[in-house]
Structure formats: structure tokens, C-alpha cells
Amino acid sequence: MYLPDIYTSSPLWLTIDVERVEDANFGITPKKELDIDYPAVLERWHQLTDSHHLRSTAFVLGSFAQKFPQAIKALHDKGHEIACHGYDHQLVYQKPFEVWREQTALAKRILEDTIQAPVQGYRSPSWSLPFEKRYYEALVEMGFAYSSSYFPFKTYMYGNAIDKKNPFVITTPSGKITEIPVPKCLIPFSGGFYMRILPLFVTKRLFASLINRGVKPIIYTHPYELLPNLFQRFLSQVKLDKAYVLTFANTGESIKRFDTILQTFTEGRV
Ligand SMILES: [Zn+2]
């Protein structure tokens, strides 16, 4: 079974989905450019990971790499794995299959041209890849060795109710591919909105419970979650609705929480 080195070498898998707030499919309204300096935000990711001697897998949108190629090269040069998050952030199941396939292949090419190295991994925007063989077959044909697109909770937008804890192999007519699912625990907790909102002691207990059962947790975050006070900052510019709350609630807490979680569960690892 193919697994990325960064996954196997740490007690938890640290991942970041590199996209702009404006790219998110559930979208803030109105869609407009927000004043966020993304290369500077990614510097904060360098600081956080350096301080814990950890490396991450960065799932990057092709459109983001076109806008900020130097920032993606810098991640690659520092030893972070660059993987593919699609070209834009539209939900996969809302696109015609062939459009998704072409855009994903394009995004992979853009990323490989940017870092001058092969890209092995794929994560669909908002975990929206249908759990169907033809999608995995297409990923194999595009040259992906693994996907991390499976979210084991059914939500209003994404996810699947089938319980998956550990990576598994999917065999397609074109070859095999590994799927690395978000491990199922009592509730979603290890990234995004959930990790910002849950009390930290609950999050720590859930991480510990997975690790004690021999399951590797996956942390996932986004660049904008590394900035403080975005909730207040954009209130006057963007409509306050469900998407706004999901996107910005408690942003700025993430860095402190990562610090605690990484210190607790990766202590002594380099
Ligand atoms: Zn995303």
C-alpha cells in the first residue's frame, strides 16, 4: 500500500488545504477579494511546523499555485509534500465527471511545473469526491498514488456514513490507489470548523483515543485559519450567514491549538 513519507513518519498526519477564503464553494457572500496576504500567512505555517520539527502535506489548489507559485515552491523547498486539491474549489459531485477529470489533471500539471517534482496525492475540495470506482480509476490514470478525500460523517454538504479508520487500497481496472480517510471517532474533531469550536480538552481526549487504538489522526487546516480575528475583521464587508460563521468562527485559535496538540502528541519526534 502506498503511503506518503510524511504520513508514516509522524504520530499524526499534519495537512493543510491551501486555498483562498474566496475559493471556498460554500462561499462567503458577496464573492469578493478579501485583503489577506497569503504568502505571509503561509510563513506562519513555516514557523509553526519548524517549531515542532514537523513537516506537513499541503493540498494545493491549481489556481492558488498559479497566483502564488513562489509560496508553493517555498513549501516544497522546506520539505513539505505538495499534493493536489483540484483546480478550483467547486464540489466534485456538482461537476460533470469529464470536467472534473480534465481540471484535476490540469491542476496536477500546474503543481508539478511549479515544484519541478511529481505530485502523488489528491484531496477533493470539501471531501466531495463521490465514493465510486470510476473517480478512483481516473485518479490512477492521472498518476496519483493516493487520495485523502474520504470523510466518515455525513454532513449537509459532504461525507459518507461508512466507518473507515485506516488507509485502505482501492483496486480499479487501471491499477491500485490508497485512500487515507479521516479516521472516524465519536464526532468530527481534527480540523477546520470542528477543531476551532470544540473545547480543547475534548479535542485532546479524541486525539488520544484514536492514538491509543493504533489509529493515526489527521489534522487538516486552511491558511485563513492561521490568522486572528477574521470574524470581526470582515463583518462589515461580507454577509453574516452560515458560511461566514463556518469559515471565520474562532479563527486565530487554531495556531494555539495546534501548538498544544503537536506538543502533546509529537513530543520528542523530529
Ligand atoms: Zn479545501
Image (spheres, rainbow, N blue to C red):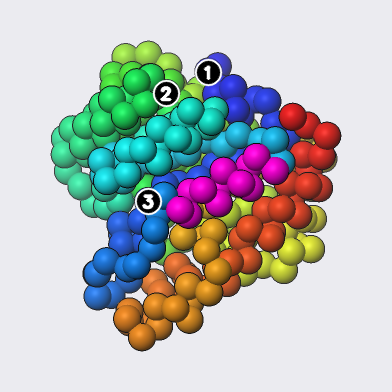
Labels 1 and 2 touching (C-beta < 8 A): yes
Identify the main secondary structure in magenta.
Answer: helix
What segment is highlighted magenta in the picture? Answer: 40-51
Residue most extreme to the bottom: 236
Residue 123 visible somewhere in the drawing = no
Mark number for residue 59? none
Determine contact: label 3, label 1, CB under 8 Å: no
Sequence-first disc among 3 and 2: 3
Secondary element at tag 2? loop
Q: What residue sits right under mark 3 in the picture?
A: 19
Residue shown at the point (26%, 31%) measured from the top left: 110
Q: Badge 2, how many Cα within 10 Å: few under 14, some, many 20+?
A: many
Q: Is residue 5 visible?
A: yes
Query: Residue type at mark 2?
Result: Gln
Residue position for label 1:
2
State the residue at coordinates (55%, 24%).
4
Q: Is residue 21 left or right of residue 141?
A: right
Residue identified by numbered label 2: 120
Disc 1 is placed on an element classified as: loop
